[in-house]
Image (spheres, grey):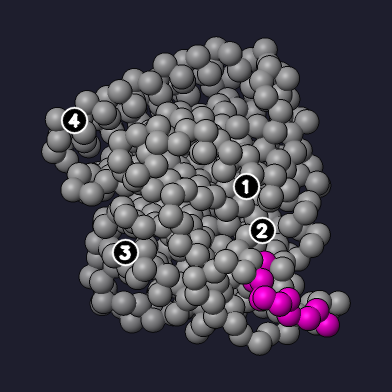
Amino acid sequence: MCDTLVSLPHYTQNGNLIFAKNSDREPDEAHEVLYAGRTFHKTRKLSCTYIEIPQVAETYEVILSKPFHMWGAEMGVNEFGLVIGNEAVFTNVKINKKNTGLTGMDLLRLALERSASAREAIHCITGLLDIYGQDACGGYQDKNFYYHNSYIIADAQQAFVLETAGKSWVLKEIHSFGSISNGLSIGTDFDKIHLVNEKRNFPFNFKKKPKPFSFSQHFSDFLYTKVGRAKTRKSCSMALIETAKGNLDIEKTIAILKTHNIPDPEFDPKKANTASLCMHATGMTNPSQTTGSMVAEIRSGLPSTIWLTASSMPCLSVYMPFFMATKTLDDLIKPGPHPDDSLWWKAEKVHRWVCRDYQNRKEKLQASLGTMQKEFIQGEKRLMDKQADYPELEKFSTACLRKVLDFYESNLT
């Protein structure tokens, strides 16, 4: 389960596009934050998560947040200010489950590496989808977790929702703000549509096309979409964005991603459900947890800021600022499948300790992280106001990362 949202420049406080996503995965599936510079390739083949495809001559600079074991990414930004997040959506199109296609995360990373604008990214994703399809497991330990994908794709000036079902897809431009969750949301009000005649799961083979044609009505799976409470989470994020109309900033966006299904002080992670934007796994009916989170402020003419937790549970995390053309992320230890010295696992140990007695243990942690968060946001604003150069941005970003690492190191229990 995931949630992705975007606000266009005219809807935000600073006149910059703001994008945000919580990535909800399996609880032990550590999230890696990765920087990759612009690269010229001599090899002809690229190994994605399950299959090889032809490599292009040049790929663009990216910052990605991704499951540690996969090639593809859940969310990311490139050097042109292109930003993308994906969602699992559940449809009635049959998946053969042979891992012969690209994952939705592969498609996202490929688009970021190969596209300079939102429209180019749409063309990239739909073109690759038509060639390779998306028969690819999206799970970690759950090897039977297959799904199709939706995306918010944006650059400094435009944003779009792209939803897929097999090789079929539908596109809708966002004109002020929007969000997506784990369900198809585009009905009859699309801007562009591409339909492929594919075999669907019983009993949906006999489902007639609605008139007028509705993409979501025709392709949605009932069970997973309902259990995942996609509509509830989307309604929640949309309402919170609308409340901040014309005044949305990074601090308010971060607060949206920290939202639970039950407000504090009553919230208990053991009673969380799939209606939470900040998701805590509780078992079979709610197996997902927010394992990584990102907010990006995309600017025209100035560096964009990519705020990442590099940890799970936004409610117990701090968002750190990162920038293109800097080396801050080079020394960040990649997390593995078991507890290690990475930031993700150090934070995870602290977060899980807090969750065993959430209301009593969270206050000190949240107070310290809240103070740190304000310092980071104010420091970043000062640098943007003075149009700081990249060495200054790198120095600031590295100091923020060091401070967070030191905090979790000192709070290991």
- Residue drawn at (42%, 29%) of the image: 251
Q: Are marks 1 and 4 in contact (CB under 8 Å)?
A: no
Residue where numbered disc 1 is placed: 234
Between the C-alphas of marks 3 and 4, the distance is: 26 Å
Q: Are marks 2 and 1 in contact (CB under 8 Å)?
A: yes
Q: Which residue is mark 4?
A: 385
Q: Which residue is mark 2?
A: 183
Q: CB of mark 4 within 8 Å of CB of mark 2?
A: no
Q: Position of residue 177 (x, y in %)?
A: 47, 48
Quarter occupied by residue 259: top right
Labels 3, 1: front one: 1
Q: For the point 79% across and 42% down, which residue is it?
A: 283
Helix, strand or loop: magenta stretch:
loop
Indicate which disc, 3 or 1, sits on the residue closer to the N terminus. 3
Residue 362 shown left or right of residue 122 in the figure: right
- Earlier sequence position, callout 2 versus callout 1: 2
Q: Residues within 10 Å of mark 2 (few under 14, many from 20)?
A: many
What span is in magenta? 206-216
| Distance CA(mark 2)–CA(mark 1) | 9 Å
Q: Residues within 10 Å of mark 4 (few under 14, many from 20)?
A: few
- Position above or below: 81 against 378: below
Mark 3 or mark 4, earlier in chain:
3
Q: Element under label 3?
A: loop
Real-space CA distance between mark 4 and mark 2, rounded to the nearest whole angstrom: 40 Å
Between discs 1 and 4, the one toward the N terminus: 1
Q: Which residue is mark 3?
A: 117
Q: What distance separates the C-alpha of mark 2 from that of mark 3?
A: 25 Å
Where's residue 165, x and y in %?
63, 73
In the displayed orientation, state which residue is furthest to the bottom.
197
